[in-house]
């Protein structure tokens, strides 16, 4: 439930509504907006006596949020959410943010070369896994803590914001120490204890759609993070499994406008995992920007043929340069722009 106050409501009026919500045994969540304040009500609101609230001074209306994912719903918050992952790097505004880098952090030389290449190509953020969820236990599992340290080094070197995956609660604490944004991968989208854990942290979370998850499932997973008090959630479409083996996954671009209608949260698109094939990444990245994605997550490797994971879908640096050039034209056609790369502003490596 959401209580919308009149634009001229006083602080005392807002407090009175909050007190009434508390009196009825629920938790109020005041959300000041540009013109008016709305007060969300957390908990099972099926038994609330809303007539008491509706009659209080300066209450404009009481809305029952019908969606199961209350706080993620557009009804809960009409303004689009902008998640700032690092100073000046905002996801969900008019600028489309380009996250690029290798699938995995493999060595100092590889991640620094990747960071320099994506910076030169026009990326704003560096992606790269230190903890890798691999289908086979015998495949490269990532460098772990050393990988995080190397990502921090790459940030110090280039000023790029860092996004990297955490696979469990302990990993999330480590990622939060070194990175700007915690990625929750497709395989962990429904790991509810991990979602609650990152929900208790303030760090931005990039939540990828599970490979067999509906959009409703994705938004409910986001709700786990929001319900613990972390509003900084970025969704990510990365393709779903279907019967067709022509591509690695079916890259569901319809999810972008669907999510924008249902939710105020930003959504980025990952055409690399979405297609699994280098020559399909470029056209689908273009399409993702055209359909309104708030960012693009794309795998780029200095030597894809030698990559320890996902080489077949990783772009060559020169392809990435060309891609960003094209994305700028597409963004401008829909009155958006591509977020600028950082002006080299090195920060501490720890
Ligand atoms: C990744 O981004 O490297 C990754 C493992 O992605 P996903 O969780 O979407 O498979
Ligand atoms: Mn990958």
Image (spheres, rainbow, N blue to C red):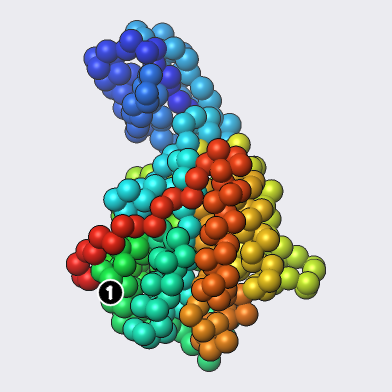
Quadrant location of residue 327?
A: bottom right
Q: Position of residue 101 (x, y in %)?
A: 46, 71
Q: What element carries label 1?
A: helix
Q: Is residue 315 left or right of residue 170?
A: right
- Residue 63 sits above or below residue 237 on the image: above
Residue 111 percent across, percent down from the top left: 39, 78
Q: Residue at x 61, y 48 (%)?
A: 330
Instruction: Using a 10 Å C-alpha cutoff, classify the residue at mark 1 as few (fewer than 14 neighbours), some (14 to 19) or many (20 or more).
Output: many
The residue nearer to you, when weighing 50 against 304, is 304
- Which residue does the image show at 36% across and 9% down from the upper left? 58
Q: Quick check: can you spot residue 187?
A: no
- On the image, numbered disc 1 is attached to which residue? 153
Image quarter where the C terminus lies is bottom left
Q: Nearer the viewer, residue 241 or 238?
A: 238
Task: Answer yes or no: disc 1 within 8 Å of ligand 1.
Answer: no
Q: Residue at x 53, y 34 (%)?
A: 74
Q: Residue 81's x, y, as percent?
A: 44, 39
Is residue 1 visible from the viewing direction of this image?
A: yes
Q: Total marks drawn?
A: 1
**Lateral position of residue 26 relative to residue 292, left or right:** left
Residue 315 vs residue 122: left or right?
right
Q: Nearer the viewer, residue 149 or 328?
A: 328
Residue 154 in the image: state x and y as whole percent. 32, 72
Residue 348 image-quadrant placement: bottom left
- Residue name at image x 54 percent, y 67 percent: 320
């Amino acid at each position: 439930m959401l209580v919308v106050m009149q634009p001229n409501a006083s602080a005392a009026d807002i407090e009175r509504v909050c007190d009434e919500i508390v009196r009825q045994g629920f938790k109020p969540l005041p959300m000041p907006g540009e013109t008016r304040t709305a007060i969300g009500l957390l908990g099972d609101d099926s038994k609330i006596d809303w007539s008491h609230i509706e009659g209080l001074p300066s209450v404009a209306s009481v809305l029952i949020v019908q969606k199961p994912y209350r706080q993620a719903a557009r009804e809960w918050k009409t303004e689009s959410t902008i998640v700032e992952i690092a100073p000046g790097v905002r996801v969900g505004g008019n600028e489309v943010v380009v996250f690029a880098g290798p699938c995995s952090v493999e060595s100092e030389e590889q991640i620094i070369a990747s960071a320099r290449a994506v910076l030169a190509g026009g990326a704003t953020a560096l992606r790269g896994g230190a903890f890798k969820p691999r289908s086979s236990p015998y495949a490269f599992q990532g460098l772990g803590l050393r990988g995080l340290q190397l990502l921090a080094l790459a940030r110090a070197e280039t000023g790029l914001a860092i996004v990297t995956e955490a696979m469990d609660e302990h990993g999330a604490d480590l990622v939060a120490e070194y990175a700007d944004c915690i990625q929750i991968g497709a395989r962990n989208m429904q790991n509810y204890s991990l979602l609650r854990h990152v929900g208790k942290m303030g760090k931005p979370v990039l939540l990828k759609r599970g490979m067999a998850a509906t959009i409703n499932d994705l938004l409910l997973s986001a709700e786990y993070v929001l319900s613990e008090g972390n509003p900084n959630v970025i969704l990510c479409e990365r393709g779903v499994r279907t019967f067709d083996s022509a591509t690695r996954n079916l890259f569901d671009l319809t999810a972008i406008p669907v999510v924008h209608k249902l939710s105020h949260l930003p959504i980025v698109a990952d055409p690399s995992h979405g297609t699994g094939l280098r020559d399909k990444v470029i056209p689908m990245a273009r399409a993702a920007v055209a359909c309104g994605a708030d960012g693009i997550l794309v795998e780029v490797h200095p030597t894809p043929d030698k990559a320890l994971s996902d080489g077949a879908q990783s772009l060559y640096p020169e392809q990435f340069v060309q891609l960003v050039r094209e994305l700028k034209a597409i963004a401008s056609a829909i009155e958006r722009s591509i977020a600028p790369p950082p002006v080299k502003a090195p920060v501490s490596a720890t």
